[in-house]
Image (cartoon, coloured by chain):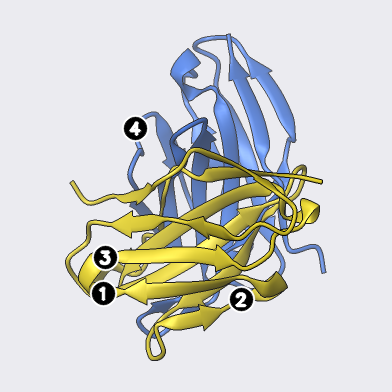
Chain colours: A blue, B yellow
Amino acid sequence: NAGVTQTPKFQVLKTGQSMTLQCAQDMNHEYMSWYRQDPGMGLRLIHYSVGAGITDQGEVPNGYNVSRSTTEDFPLRLLSAAPSQTSVYFCASSRNRDRVREKLFFGSGTQLSVL
Amino acid sequence: AQSVSQHNHHVILSEAASLELGCNYSYGGTVNLFWYVQYPGQHLQLLLKYFSGDPLVKGIKGFEAEFIKSKFSFNLRKPSVQWSDTAEYFCAVNLKTSYDKVIFGPGTSLSVIP
């Protein structure tokens, strides 16, 4: 059981370039989310999805797009990278349970540098 | 603004010392509360959680946390830390009325000296 898999582990971009961070889970979790981790700021929620075809914004959605065409995959797109997006990105998933957010399972992270 | 705060950015303790990490939140509704830990080079993983019932919850590796509703707090404790507890600790909250958003605090880095 692989859990939550993120690729790539490291990426360097130039300002203005686009890229997609991949996230896949094999636990049949309905809920998936993306966070960015910055020193002194903890993890901030970018976007989340409660099921295929459904996405919503978190705390810091600007500059990022997501889609959820399948239960397994939840890619995060940077359309025009900026130095402020230099961060470590984590994908997390969990089961849905009525009115309760079950524990999150995290991927190993993607370290992104934008020059 | 609604937020989650953690009292200390970095804590340094000697082995066998007692630990208490503070967490406060500013949400007014009913909440679910979590503590996650990130050991060096590893994934974030759940330490413990509070959904309802007994406000004193026990987690893995001897950790416990107490929910004090009147103080909007969920402090993490361990009576005797070990070198292997060196990690970053995150408090997290979600509102039962908006339970799809799990909001994290800024984290506390714990260093345990042998």
Crowding near pointer 3: few (<14 within 10 Å), some, many (20+)? some
Do labels 3 and 2 touch, CB within 8 Å?
Answer: no
Quadrant in which residue B55 is drawn: bottom left
Query: Marks 3 and 1, Cα distance to the nearest angstrom?
Result: 5 Å
- In this rendering, position of residue A106 left or right of residue A83: right
| Residue A27 shows in the view | no
- The residue that appears at 51% across and 48% down in the rendered structure is A34
- Name the subunit of mark 4: A
Query: Marks 4 and 1, Cα distance to the nearest angstrom?
Result: 34 Å
Query: Marks 4 and 2, Cα distance to the nearest angstrom?
Result: 36 Å
Which sits earlier in the primary sequence, circle 2 or circle 1?
2
- For the residue labelled by badge 2, is the local secondary structure a helix, a strand or a loop? loop
Q: Which residue is mark 4?
A: A62
- In this rendering, position of residue B97 left or right of residue A62: left
Nearer the observer: mark 4 or 2; the answer is: 2
Labels 4 and 2 in the same subunit: no
Do labels 3 and 4 touch, CB within 8 Å?
Answer: no
Residue type indicated by callout 3: Phe
Nearer the observer: mark 4 or 1; the answer is: 1
Q: Which residue is mark 1?
A: B69
Q: Which mark is residue A98?
A: none
Crowding near pointer 2: few (<14 within 10 Å), some, many (20+)? some
Q: Which residue is mark 3?
A: B72
Q: Which residue is mark 2?
A: B59
